[in-house]
Image (cartoon, grey):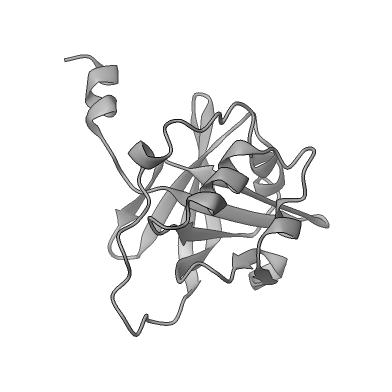
């Protein structure tokens, strides 16, 4: 089994990660992310070094990680198929400012904001180690299934972000 065969078998959830720094906002679709510690709680998101969100996130103190539902493909298309270099994605999505201005997508019920604790070089992506500081209020009803990588494999992600 090659590494590609192994990763092709994975079908994890996708997230929209948002950032704000130096008067700029950014957000992108992320398929590489995971809890990485229980105590203390930590989560890592991997951002492509080729995209706009990475450039904004490098200077950000906080990132917000939004777990998309299966019925939120339009948000995945917006944040995963268009680049913030040329499009203000937040003009096309409902949001409010969170910690340090970091955008919180108001149509996404499951999210958390994390303080950036460090950055990890990883080839064409950089991991942002996050310490959760705020999270969405608990849902009253069970959340529908999350949107998964397999649901968005057809998106042309190129330099989106």
Outermost residue to the top: 2
Q: Relative to residue 93, is residue 31 drawn left or right?
A: left
* Position of the N terminus by quadrant: top left
Give the number of marks.
Answer: 0
Please tell me which residue lies in front, 130 or 82: 82
Please tell me which residue lies in front, 88 or 53: 88
For image coordinates 55% across by 28% down, the residue present is 156
Q: Relative to residue 49, is residue 112 drawn left or right?
A: left
Residue 55: where, in percent of width, then height?
70, 40
Tell me if residue 29 comes above or below residue 43 in the rendering.
Answer: above
For image coordinates 70% across by 68% down, the residue present is 100
For image coordinates 61% across by 31% down, the residue present is 49
Outermost residue to the right: 23
Residue 47: where, in percent of width, then height?
54, 39
Residue 50: where, in percent of width, then height?
64, 28
Outermost residue to the bottom: 140
Q: Relative to residue 152, is residue 99 drawn left or right?
A: right
Tell me if residue 161 comes above or below residue 113 in the rendering.
Answer: above
Q: Quadrant of residue 53?
A: top right
Q: Quadrant of residue 110?
A: bottom left
* Position of the C terminus by quadrant: top right
Residue 65: where, in percent of width, then height?
50, 58
For image coordinates 57% across by 41% down, the residue present is 80
């Amino acid at each position: 089994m090659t590494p590609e065969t192994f990763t092709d078998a994975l079908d994890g959830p996708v997230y929209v990660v948002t950032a704000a720094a130096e008067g700029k906002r950014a957000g992108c679709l992320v398929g590489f992310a995971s809890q990485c510690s229980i105590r203390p709680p930590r989560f890592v998101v991997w951002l492509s070094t080729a995209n706009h969100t990475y450039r904004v996130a490098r200077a950000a103190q906080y990132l917000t990680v939004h777990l998309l539902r299966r019925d939120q493909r339009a948000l995945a298309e917006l944040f995963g198929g268009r680049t913030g270099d040329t499009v203000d994605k937040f003009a096309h999505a409902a949001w409010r400012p969170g910690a340090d201005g970091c955008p919180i997508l108001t149509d996404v019920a499951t999210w958390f904001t994390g303080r950036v604790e460090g950055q990890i070089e990883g080839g064409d992506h950089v991991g942002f180690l996050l310490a959760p500081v705020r999270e969405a209020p608990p849902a009253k009803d069970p959340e529908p299934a999350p949107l998964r990588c397999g649901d968005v494999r057809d998106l042309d992600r190129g330099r989106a972000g």
